[in-house]
């Protein structure tokens, strides 16, 4: 099972355990005892303990005194410093984002997004998204319907931004994004498999094309326990040099 390749045995075991955990266990699951792991992997108790310690350092498992070792809930890192769809970003982290349901709504009446992207009629794409087969996010994407004719019939991939670029030559070059906390409504809780009033992160994003014209607006709510936002900050003084 393990090779004599110069890599310490406990590191090889740590990597094997991580792979097995990701493939066979869910967050909060109890993993086998040290005695059982010895039998499964045919290594010493010391090697088992060192491998578990490494998994603890990497926040993959957590030990609870008197109860055992449990799989930790893994938060997805969302890098807010570059343009890209949620699907594109998560695929780079080896996570699979899929669509559980999709609806299309044409909005002709007054709506706040019409002023943001300067259009007469909106197309709203409503999607319920799953991450690694677990409820993850609810997404609303608004577009000027004149710029995306027949999108409902043509949209057939997971990444909306990739689809817009390939099919309509719509590409985003910059965006304004705000993030806030909110409590899950009854409907949101039901769709995401959480309790009503559980914590959600709400993202609002206005995306612009290469001419700095607003093209798309999105409202996204994500389960807070599965998500973390990364932003790179810089010293304002550097801009005055």
Image: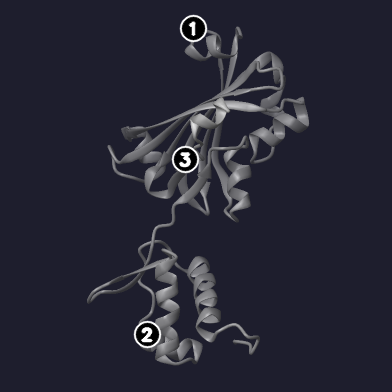
The Cα atoms of the two marked residues, 3 and 2, are separated by 36 Å
- Residue 174 image position (x, y, % from top left): 62, 27
Residue 185 vertical placement versus 99 (above, below): above
- The secondary element bearing badge 3 is classed as strand
Q: Earlier in the sequence, mark 2 or mark 1?
A: 2
Colouring method of the image: one colour
The numbered mark at residue 187 is none
Q: Which residue is mark 3?
A: 137
* CB-based contact (under 8 Å), mark 2 and mark 1: no
The numbered mark at residue 110 is 1
Horizontal relation, residue 162 to residue 36: left or right = right
- Residue 224 image position (x, y, % from top left): 38, 44
Foreground residue among 65 and 120? 65
**Location of the C terminus (image quadrant):** top right
- The secondary element bearing badge 1 is classed as loop
Numbered disc in front, either 3 or 2? 2
The numbered mark at residue 34 is 2
Residue 6 falls in image quadrant: bottom right
Foreground residue among 225 and 121? 225
The residue at the far front in this view is 241
Instruction: Specify few, some or many for label 1: CA neighbours under 10 Å numbering under 14, 14-19, or 20 or more.
Output: few
- Residue 33 image position (x, y, % from top left): 35, 82
Residue 162 vertical placement versus 49 (above, below): above
Q: Residue at x 53, y 79 (%)?
A: 11
């Amino acid at each position: 099972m393990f090779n004599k390749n110069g890599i310490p045995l406990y590191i090889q075991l740590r990597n094997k355990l991580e792979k097995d955990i990701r493939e066979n266990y869910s967050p909060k699951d109890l993993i086998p005892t040290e005695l059982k792991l010895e039998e499964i992997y045919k290594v010493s108790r010391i090697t088992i303990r060192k491998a578990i310690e490494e998994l603890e350092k990497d926040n993959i498992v957590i030990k609870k005194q008197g109860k055992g070792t449990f799989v930790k809930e893994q938060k997805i890192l969302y890098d807010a410093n570059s343009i890209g769809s949620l699907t594109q970003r998560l695929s780079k982290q080896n996570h699979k984002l899929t669509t559980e349901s999709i609806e299309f709504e044409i909005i002709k009446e007054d709506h706040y997004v019409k002023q943001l992207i300067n259009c007469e009629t909106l197309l709203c794409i409503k999607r319920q998204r799953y991450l690694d087969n677990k409820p993850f996010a609810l997404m609303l994407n608004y577009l000027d319907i004149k710029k995306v004719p027949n999108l409902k019939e043509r949209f057939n991939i997971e990444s909306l931004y990739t689809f817009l670029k390939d099919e309509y030559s719509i590409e985003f070059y910059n965006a304004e994004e705000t993030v806030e906390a909110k409590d899950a409504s009854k409907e949101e809780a039901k769709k995401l498999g959480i309790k009503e009033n559980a914590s959600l992160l709400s993202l609002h994003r206005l995306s612009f094309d290469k001419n700095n014209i607003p093209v798309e607006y999105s409202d996204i709510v994500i389960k807070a326990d599965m998500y973390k936002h990364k932003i790179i900050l810089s010293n304002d003084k550097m801009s005055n040099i």
